[in-house]
Amino acid sequence: MFITQTLRRAVQINASGTATIFGERRQTWQQFQERVARLAGALKELDVGAADRVAILALNSDRYLEYLYGVAWAGAACNPINIRLAPPEIAYTLEDSGSAVLLIDDAFSQMLPALRPLLTAVQHVIFIGDGPCPEGCLDYERLLAQSAPVPDADAGGDDLAGLFYTGGTTGKSKGVMLSHDNIVYNALNVLPALGYDDQSVYLHAAPMFHLADMANTFAVTMGAGTHVAVPRFDVEAVLDTASRHRVTHLLLVPTMVNLLVSSGRIGDYDLGSVKRLMYGASPMPEAVLKKAMTLLPGVELAQGYGQTEAAPVITFLEPRFHVEGGAKLTSAGRPAYGVEVIVVDDEDRELPRGQAGEVCARGMNVMQGYWGLKEQTEQTLRNGWLHTGDIGYMDEDGFVHIVDRAKDMIITGGENVFSVEVEGAIYEHPGVQECAVIGVPSEQWGEAVHAVVVPGPDVSLTAEEIIEHCRQRIAGYKQPRSVSFQNESLPVSGAGKILKTELRKPFWEEHNRKVS
């Protein structure tokens, strides 16, 4: 399978159809392919070769889509950077991946003075924004104008398509290696679930670096539909864009759905064109889901459950199961067509239906492994199965129900936060003796990062002081939203591990799930 074959199909069946809409810019699929081939030519002139990494740090745009296909057309591998990371975290991603080229837009070019001293791998920075090109950068439009289109490199199959960085239990992000087969196979799973064709108009409202959105990116192209993008999620922009451009499909993470249905503005716009809204990336609070079903009665809702390592879809909860009071409404759905799912015990033995254990999956969508991390790869993919780290059970009808997480991870607003990284930042404070970071329920974020801190002897600390301390060290979404203090030592197991389950209990007593 080849990522670029999805583009070539779109041109074959819908050459004059609209491929992208961004602000006042729009282009046909034929024009889009021409620009992709020129971008690939420009990358070749910058000595980008097979499997070389090309990174991007930018908000959503039509050029972001050109990047995804241009890199594949050149035979290289993409490295879409999380836009919420702090400069040291961005630099780590670029250095660890060995990215030789970085594309950056107006929103992030101001970071360049802080980034450049931290970088050794990046040789070229390409400015894809609409403002003046910063000093020391190559101008994107000028590059395309000066570069001749090149033939498709025909990278595909097991060739590396991209590195997608996700949180790591060591405190460092792990680069998930996804091949062309992984990504296109995932798109084939998404296509029937969302029903994309050449009449579909998809709105990129979730960040395009995120695989939740990217899963739809390649499926929409495969269906030869239209990509519409807003730079970032904004309730007014989403509603206005969806109405003006007759959007038929969109994906939102639960926090976005919550903001949308709580805005009081849905009735001010004509959303009659919207057929289906997919949500995923973090669990959906049931109250928010019910509100969405009420306020969007003509829109079919679908849930996707998965993770970066699965490119990312593992299960779907189809629209017909989104019935208030329905027995399956709080489940994660059934395995996607090309994915096999089992639930196992600590010895990796499959458990009977209804018994909780670790959710495991396998299929052509499962990653090749973690970049440069052989032991972690072998552990995660042991016995031929992707071990998700999620605790759940499968009912008699094949629906997967997620109840907890085995990995020490918090999902807040669709982003993965590993507590060890936050704890590492907090422990740098000289007044902290012990700390533990847990996820607590949040109607806005699904889960919020909460820190439990034991101050040192005769030390007085405030929540504001701890949060400000973290602000200087880690990305905003990883910072604690709240802090509690206790004088006694944190509870530990016989092996000396902090019993976070005990710390979480008071916050989750009124909830059916231990994650939200």
Image (cartoon, rainbow, N blue to C red):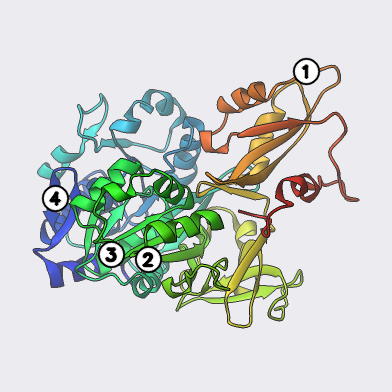
Q: Nearer the viewer, mark 2 or mark 4?
A: 4
In primary-sequence order, the first of circles 4 and 3 is 4
The amino acid on which the numbered mark 2 sits, given as a three-letter code, is His
In terms of image quadrants, where is residue 351? Answer: bottom right
Most extreme residue toward the left, as rendered? 16
Report if the CB atoms under discs 4 and 3 are less than 8 Å apart: no
Mark 1 = which residue?
A: 460
| Image point (39%, 47%), residue name | 260
Q: Nearer the viewer, residue 513 or 364?
A: 513
Residue 425, how many percent across, how many down? 65, 31
| Image point (46%, 73%), residue name | 364
- Which numbered marker is on residue 304? none
In primary-sequence order, the first of circles 3 and 1 is 3
The amino acid on which the numbered mark 4 sits, given as a three-letter code, is Arg
Q: CA distance from mark 2 to mark 4?
A: 27 Å
- Which numbered marker is on residue 26? 4
Residue 8, how many percent across, how many down? 19, 68
- Is any part of residue 307 visible from this angle? yes
**Mark 4 surroundings: few (<14), some (14-19) or many (≥20) residues within 10 A:** some
Q: Nearer the viewer, mark 1 or mark 2?
A: 1
In primary-sequence order, the first of circles 1 and 2 is 2
130 lies above or below 222:
above
Most extreme residue toward the right, as rendered? 494
